[in-house]
Amino acid sequence: MSSDVVVGSRVAVVGGGVVGLSVAWLAAASGLAVVVVDPSPARGGASWVAGGMLAPVTEAWPGEEAVLGLGLDSLARWPDFAARLRADSGVDPGLDLAGTLVVAADGADAEVLRVLADYLAGLGREVRALTGRELRRLEPGIGPSVRSGLEVPGDLAVDNRALLTALLAACERRGVRFDRRSAAEVGPGRVSTTDGSTVDCDAVVVSAGAWSGSLHPALADAIRPVKGEILRLRARRGALPPPTRTVRALVESRPVYLVPRPGGLVLGATQYEAGFDGDVTVGGVRDLLRDAERVLPGVAEYALDEVVAGFRAGSPDNLPLVGEVEPGVLVAAGHHRNGLLLAPVTAEAVLAALRGDAPPESARVADPARLSAVAR
């Protein structure tokens, strides 16, 4: 990652999701004057509808060692990040240390988990294979059709909406200014907005999630929207309580996750290459509910409180883009499923670039220059 970005006292962060707010908070805490350009900070993007998993181990797969390494580094930063955020904001960001179960619904799904377990064991990661009976001892609500699974104590979760509330409060306490206009494009020293005005600055950080690709020519082919549908379920009186851990599952090769929240669950997530089509489909909701009921039959008694589609920011190689795209313009986007997980290490890498310092070692793999090198 280059260190010759324009370092100055005025920083414009385009995008008010978890990554943008994390960058803005740490930059302001270090003494920089920060403005966040976003019409709906904390509420308008994928961060608001996310499941909240901090799960580099259960997301791991052979061939994506760079993704795993970056995720593990950021996960290790999360306890201190959450504690500092709580102290700075006065709001509990909702970090959940209970761990994760990954379960298989049939023999083919169990074989996929066996491959994952062998791969992780080879990397020295802590996982424990469990039978269906052992899974049900840990989480009695898991259904009888679940064959086997893995316990991954190191993979955590966070309440995404509590986190965003805390970040917003911390930014406000640190003097971050919010400009609720929409950005149209960025360049060195400026953010042009859709109403024809300009926000002047010394450095720009593009962290607008799936919309980042439209803001600078270098990002046009590097970041794309990946649609996902997520449901929020509420445990009604008399229903079984939510599990104490995050439960990820493969059901006839379809991934599904159930993340506990106070009094309910977040259930997700479908994945489509559908551009910015924001409709929630009947088929997507049907599949999520059917698969969730197979894993946790008790969810049939829950209330369906919210159904929403969001847009993850995909990249060509599943790694984010974090670093300089031209002098005075940085990017912190393309995190796909891992925006919440990677927020701490991303924010530290951007702050290092703004200071002209070297980034964390693990973040070097996210340098956007790698994509232009491949294109050549």
Image (cartoon, grey):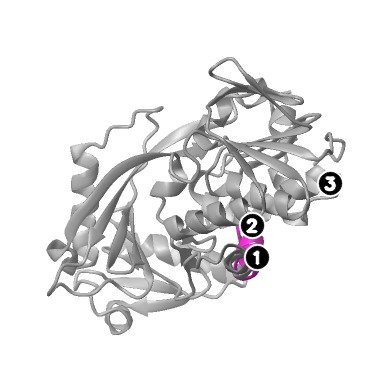
The answer to whether residue 111 is magenta is no
Residue 121: x and y, percent? 56, 71
Element at badge 1? Answer: helix
Q: Where are the magenta residues, as a range?
A: 70-80
The mark found on residue 77 in the picture is 1
Q: Residues within 10 Å of mark 3 (few under 14, many from 20)?
A: some
Q: Are marks 2 and 3 in contact (CB under 8 Å)?
A: no
340 in relation to 141, above or below = above
- Identity of the residue drawn at 58% across and 62% down: 89
**Nearest to viewer (mark 1 / mark 3):** 3
Gap between marks 2 and 1, in whole Å?
Answer: 6 Å
Residue type, label 2: Pro
Query: In terms of depth relative to the viewer, which is nearer, 244 or 55?
Result: 244
The residue labelled by disc 2 is 344
Question: Looking at the rendering, in which quadrant would you find the C terminus?
Answer: top right
The residue labelled by disc 3 is 355
